[in-house]
Amino acid sequence: MTALAADETPSRASAVQKVISKSGIEAWLVEDYAVPLIAVEFAFKGGAAQDPLGKPGTATLLSGLLDEGAGSYDSESFHRALDEDAIEMSFSAERDALIGRMQTLSRNADRAFALLRLAVTEPRFDSEPFERVMGQIAAGLKREANDPEFVAGRAFRALAYPDHPYGQPLRGDLAALPAITRANLADMRAAMFARDNLKISAVGAIGAAALARYVEEVFGSLPEKAFLNPVAPAPFLGMGMRKVIEIGVPQSAIRFGREGLARKDPDFMAAMVVNHILGGGIFSARLFREVREKRGLAYSVYSRLVTHDHAAMLAGGTSTKNERAAESIAVIEQEISDLAKEGPAQDELDKAKKYLIGSYPLRFDTSTKIAGQLTSLQTEGFGVEYLDDRNRLIAAVTLEDARRAAKRLLGDGKLLVTVAGQPEAL
Amino acid sequence: MSFGASNSIRKALFLTSAKEAAGKPSGPAVTRAKLANGLEIIVIPDHRAPVVTHMIWYRNGSADDPLGKSGIAHFLEHLMFKGTKAYPQGQFSELIAGLGGQENAFTANDYTAYFQRTAKEHLDICMRYEADRMKNLVLTEEIVGPERDVVLEERRMRTDSDPSEQLNEAVQAALFTQHPYGRPIIGWAHEIESLSRADALDYYERFYTPENAIVVVAGDVCAADVIGLAEKNYGPLQARGERPKQFRPREPVPRAHRLVTLADEKVEQPLHQSVFLVPSYRTAAPGGAEALEVLAHLLGGGPTSLLFKTLAVDQKLAVSAGAHYQGTAVDDTRFYVFAVPAPGVSLERIDGSIDAVIARVAAQGVNEADFLRAKNRLIAEAVYAQDNQATLARWYGASLASGLSVEDVQRWPERIEAVTPSDVSKAALWLDKRRSVTGFLLPAGQKAPPGSIDAIESIAL
């Protein structure tokens, strides 16, 4: 881990071993014995973008049922087995991948990987846990039904990507939830859980040979190829549009955004620096300074770059009392338009680059954080060498690059804006 | 600048099983020191990555807000980022960001903490700045006004737009009839509106002193170096002679169960919660808090727990249920039980079922296998904590700021190990309905039917 968090020498990439199992499954490993733990994170590419038509939330429900009974264990005995050895196991659906995470004391590794194998390869989808988890998801959706932050966020997604899986709610919606069947889950698992779309990372007190054995044990019996539905490119729509959803609360939740830059776009790094200047930095960003510090309009205001496999956006949000919601939006639009026109100042650019470069080691100071970083690199299609290249790429961003990226990212400054609350004068 | 909600409960840390530890504290070799001016220092080594977490904890939180000035601890926490003479507004934040560092702060009932996370070589500058803003804060009216608006927006976001948070506030206010834990950390809106620059400076003057502060450093550092840096940076701060006085009136023994209901048109999912007044790690008799910790895990620590199994799996009255003990507190504290009802199930029905589960534990004790599993799981959490230096720093900081010692933290797994089944049954006696407030969150137009529960008092909102 020392090398992984270190600055230049030895290189971060050199701390990562590529482990290949008997049947050829690759896993990235960082060995470290300081704490007697093993952290594993893996991803099956596909995710919620594979939800069947009219059944948003299928991948989320699948991820909720993998640890609810598998093999000879029913839900209760599976949880009890995890509990007895203090094994942490969880699954979650993201837009383009289904993620699994496991943490175990190294002395319980045999048991932990055996249970993981069952969850991945033999989940039962019994009707009792199926109904119960469905009920939990429905209860969560009901709790969010009139929560302004969620309402504005959902409306934003739906307008940005209409008729596309990225516009659907990740955790489903109340009307469509009952249509999801156990067969849908089994079908999705069978299509998505394969060896050719699997990315694995492990960190902690485990050697390469042992990891190779465990990887084979857990994933070796999966089919070689996944059968994923093609996902169409999703252009960001609705720029220039404003939508207000009335909810009886004193504050308006605001979401804004526009088309972004793809992860592999040559200007992506420059765009990341530009976003940091706009609304990515906590105390340093222009939006923080103008919306929060100078005018006291909001507690939270941010922007970020979101990239999916088939879409990219700049997305941001804030919450302001109804009387001043219009003012908040105007300030945000002004800042975006200024940055698009003028680009950042040299001094701002230097500071943003210094922060982004200098804070990189903070992403590598726990086993679970490292496993997460390595898995997302793999799912984004980068090699180990990116761990060393990343800071060099940021350092290489010039003022000209940043101005160009600002123009491309912020363009004419037109935004899709959704507001939930009772905003005045909108 | 978030406030630490009700904050994380379990402290502890350390390694392997407590049996192997055999009387000797285990886990990272923590060093403790105290400067002549009273400032305490805790050093937690973690040499896996060349980064450091620097925190300063002040032993004052929302429970020390003067009467009528609720929210001042949290408001001052915001204002502490407004700069000093040496580092005028924004300058330190810029400096730390330029070094790739991250910073923030949070306020809880019993403490307020500030932190930076950076590459290890920048510890010195972090300390220099924290020492500077302990006594040289500069506040002007131009700065205080907009920041008060920011806090009001923070309150609108967290509470005023969310019926379940409004119910939580009412439940806490009902549980604590005179102890200040009953007041919200962020403050009541009408009191925040009246907080002035002078209020903030008075509060700052009273509590931001070396005697009242604990510096916690976790990361790739050696204790002697850290103590040397602390001496250099914090040493020159003038001692005040004693710690600031706190006024914490004790709660009387509660004798009446209270039911608090909130019905709102925005509510589509009803919720049930009960909060019991129980001793904390600080106020409990030896072993009492540890037994409550094990009880909370047995009752409601995940899908194998009694409440979850009974209500969600067997009876199908709820889709989820759990429990939680907020043990790290200076004064008597809270034990939470909650459930999310299945569609069509009344909260009264849920309430009766929860009562029965608790009564069964108190009367019949606990299953041996469940009991051992709960203890193992708790002890393992202390091992997992070692993977994260920021988590370790927070556990030590919160524990010490709540009046516990380094040894209390280090020996926590041993003390959990020592809990017996009969201790747990005894702990369940604290969950006497008369010691509790029950909160019902309901859709508009619904009310708890009178007489369905032994409601003695209710608060309408």
Image (cartoon, coloured by chain):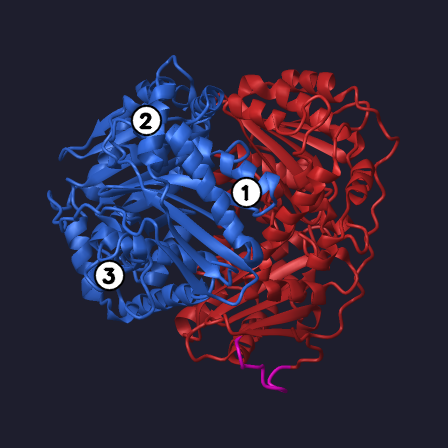
Chain colours: A blue, B red
**Are labels 2 and 1 on one chain?**
yes
Between the residue at mark 3 and the residue at mark 1, the CA separation in whole angstroms equals: 51 Å
Kindly identify the residue that appears in the image at 77 percent across and 65 percent down. B177
Q: Which residue is mark 2?
A: A404
Q: Residue furthest top?
A: A9
Residue A225 spot, x, y in % from top left: 11, 44
In magenta stretch: residue A307: no
**Left or right of residue A22: residue B2:** right
Q: Which residues are magenta?
A: B443-453
Left/right of residue A35 with respect to residue A51 in the rendered view? right
To which chain does the residue with label 3 belong?
A: A
Q: Which residue is mark 3?
A: A124
Front-most of B432 and A157?
A: A157
Q: Height in image: B104 above or below B145?
A: above
Mark 2–mark 1 contact, CB under 8 Å? no
Q: Say the numbered circle drawn on residue A291.
A: 1
Q: CA distance from mark 3 to mark 2?
A: 53 Å
**Residue B279: which numbered mark, if any?**
none
Whether labels 3 and 2 belong to a single chain: the reply is: yes
Q: Measuring 71% from the left and 41% from the top, which residue is drawn there? A: B144
